[in-house]
Each structure stands twice: as structure tokens, then as C-alpha cells.
Image (spheres, grey):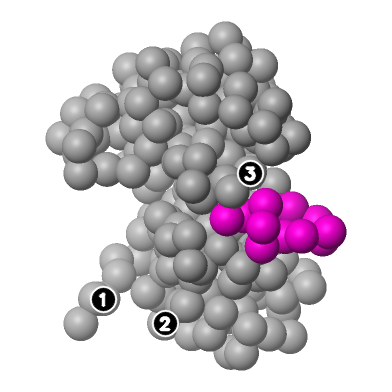
Amino acid sequence: MSEISNQHKTVLANLAAASKRAGRAPADLVAVSKVQPDGRIAAMLKTGQRIFGENRVQEAQTRWGETFADHRGEIELRLIGPLQTNKAADAVALFDVIETVDREKLVKALVKAVGEGEMPRLYVQVNTGEEPQKSGILPAELPAFLKTMRETYALEPEGLMCIPPAGEAASPHFWMLSNLAKDNGVEKLSMGMSEDYEIAAEMGATSVRVGSALFGQRNYD
């Protein structure tokens, strides 16, 4: 528990310092809890951390709908992994924020799933590296996609999100996302992970998604 607490304090301090260097308000810290054991999640909750990110709907349902159901009302839960359209109803029911909107078919499924209820806050994932294996709207296609969201579905995205290509410097991708947001009237930016969250904060991130730097390395066995 003390290790989790110390890592949490360190990341928050680093985040605050990076934001201050850029003259910005501190970015929100999203604790990426995917595949983490229950003991680490419990320890993180005890630090006062209240924003968590999950990659899979089913895993999140088990964690926050069963194991830590008593804490669900205290936290903000974000989906930061790919979302299949057949999971749209489950996602709408569980998450406060969906960060991986990446195609019109998914937008349509979310609208259908939410019905007369309240839509989670939405971020559009942008494939800044134009990687064929990765989800996300291509940068050149973003204006048209946002227009469709706004005019066809009456949805205003809260922000943009990106995952820079592995092995490349992250800063050009953060710079691109920031400019795309400005050019298209989008307010918030979800960018930066354990290895580059300080750079992201300096470049305008309003939230960063941090896993291993908070919890330690994941065990996928």
C-alpha cells in the first residue's frame, strides 16, 4: 500500500510541475487499472484517486460492478480501449466517459443505446500516426467526422484522444492533436501515458492516462 501511495504522490507532483512549467492548470490523472490485481486497486482508492480508466467493458463490469461496486458512486470511470458496437449499451450504462469514439457506426450505436438517457461524455480517438492496425479517425478526416457527430447526431465531443506510435517521439503527435483540437473547436485533450505524461501535460493535455507508473508493471499471465 505504501508503494502505491508513494507512486501516486510522485506522479501527481510530476504532473503538477509539468503543467506549471507550461502555465496550465494541472491535468486530470486517469489511473489505468486494467489487468491490475484487486489489492493494488484497493490501495489506489485509499490514496483518494477518483478517476480510473479501463480498456475492456467486461473487465470493468466485473471490477466496478461487483468487486468494487461500493466505490462506483465515488469515482469517474473512463473507457480508454476500443469499443465494439455490440457492447455500446453496456458501455453507456457503466462509463462516465468514452474516449475511443472512432467511427460513425459506433456513434449510431451509442445514440441508440442511450435512448432518452444521458450520454457519457465523448472523446474522439485520432490516429495521429495513421497506423493501419490502430483504431482512430485519420487527422484529415477529423473535420468531416466531427461535423457528422454535431449535425447528424447532435453530439458535441468533449475532447480528442491519441496514442502515439510505439518507438516514435510522442511530442509531434501531442502537438498535432492540440492543433486539431484548436482548429475544430474541441476543448479537451486526453494524451500521455506512463512514459510521456509530463511531456503531454506541458503540451496541453487536460487528462493523462497512467498505468504502470502508478500501479507497477502488469502481470498478463
- Residue 147, position as x, y percentages in the image: 61, 22
User: Residue at point 46% right, 41% down?
Assistant: 103
What's under tag 2, amino acid-wise? Pro
- State the image quarter where residue 214 is shown: bottom left
Residue 40 placement (x, y as % from top left): 47, 77
Q: Is residue 107 left or right of residue 138?
A: right
The residue at which mark 2 appears reads as 37
| Amino acid residing under circle 1 | Asn
Q: Nearer the viewer, residue 127 or 218?
A: 127
Q: Hey, what amino acid is under mark 3?
A: Leu
Residue linked to disc 1 = 219
User: Does residue 110 belong to the magenta stretch?
Assistant: yes
Name the front one of labels 2 and 3: 3
Q: CA distance from mark 1 to mark 2?
A: 9 Å
Helix, strand or loop under label 3: strand
Q: Which residues are magenta?
A: 109-120
Percent of width and height locating residue 171? 34, 21
- Residue at x 52%, y 74% (from the top left corner): 60
Q: Is residue 80 above or below residue 28?
A: below
Label 1 environment density (alpha carbons within 10 Å; few <14, some 14–19, many ≥20) = few
Residue 67, position as x, y percentages in the image: 58, 89
CA gap, disc 2 to disc 3? 28 Å
Query: Of label 1 and label 2, which has the lower sequence position?
Result: 2
Q: Is residue 163 visible?
A: yes
Relative horizontal placement of residue 15, taking residue 165 as reference (left or right): right
Give above or below for 178 relative to 80.
above
Reading the image, the residue beneath label 3 is 122
